[in-house]
Amino acid sequence: RVQLVESGGGSVQAGGSLRLSCAASGYVFSSYCMGWFRQTPGKEREGVAVIDTDGSTTYAVSVKGRITISKDNAENTLYLQMNSLNPEDTAMYYCAAAPYEPRLTCIQALRGFGNWGQGTKVTVSS
C-alpha cells in the first residue's frame, strides 16, 4: 500500500529556510503525480506545489519564487525547499501522491483520490 512519511519540519525565524522531505513507498514512484499541501486550524487544506509525472510543476501564488518542489525518482523522495519563510507559512505540511489520470490535472487528482502522509509541522516566528 502507498505510504508517505514527511520530515524536515521545525521552527524557524522569518526569513529562514527549511527543506521538507517525503519518503514514499508502496507504488511506482515515477508514475504518480505528487504535491505538498498545508493546513492551519479552521482553514481548508491549501495546495502549495505539485509536480506531475513529466516533471512539470505548479505553485500557489503565495509561495511562487520562494518555494521549490522537486523529486528524486531513484530515492523515491519528494522535496519542498522553502526559503524566505514568513509567519503566514506556519502550518502543517502534508505530502500527497496520486496515480496519473489523463483527464485531470495533478492537483485535481491529488484532491480527488490522493494518498496522504501524516504531516510535518512548520512554525515561522516573526
Image (cartoon, helix red, strand yellow):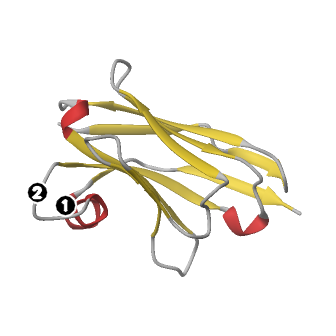
* Amino acid type, callout 2: Pro
Q: Residues within 10 Å of mark 1 (few under 14, many from 20)?
A: few
The quadrant of the picture occupied by the N terminus is: top left
* Amino acid type, callout 1: Phe
Q: Image height check: is 104 above or below 56?
A: below
Q: For mark 2, what is the residue?
A: 102
Q: Image height check: is 38 above or below 42?
A: above
Q: Which residue corresponds to the image point at 72% horizontal and 48% vertical from the top-left?
A: 83
Q: Is residue 71 left or right of residue 122?
A: left
Q: Earlier in the sequence, mark 2 or mark 1?
A: 2
Which of the two discs, 2 and 1, sits closer to the camera? 2
Q: How many marks?
A: 2
Task: Looking at the picture, tell me which residue is in the foreground, 57 or 9.
Answer: 57
The quadrant of the picture occupied by the C terminus is: bottom right
Q: Residue furthest top?
A: 74
Q: Residue furthest bottom?
A: 42
Residue 123, numbered label: none
Residue 121 at what x, y percent from top left? Answer: 61, 52
Q: Which residue corresponds to the image point at 22% horizontal and 61% vertical from the top-left?
A: 109
Residue 113, numbered label: 1
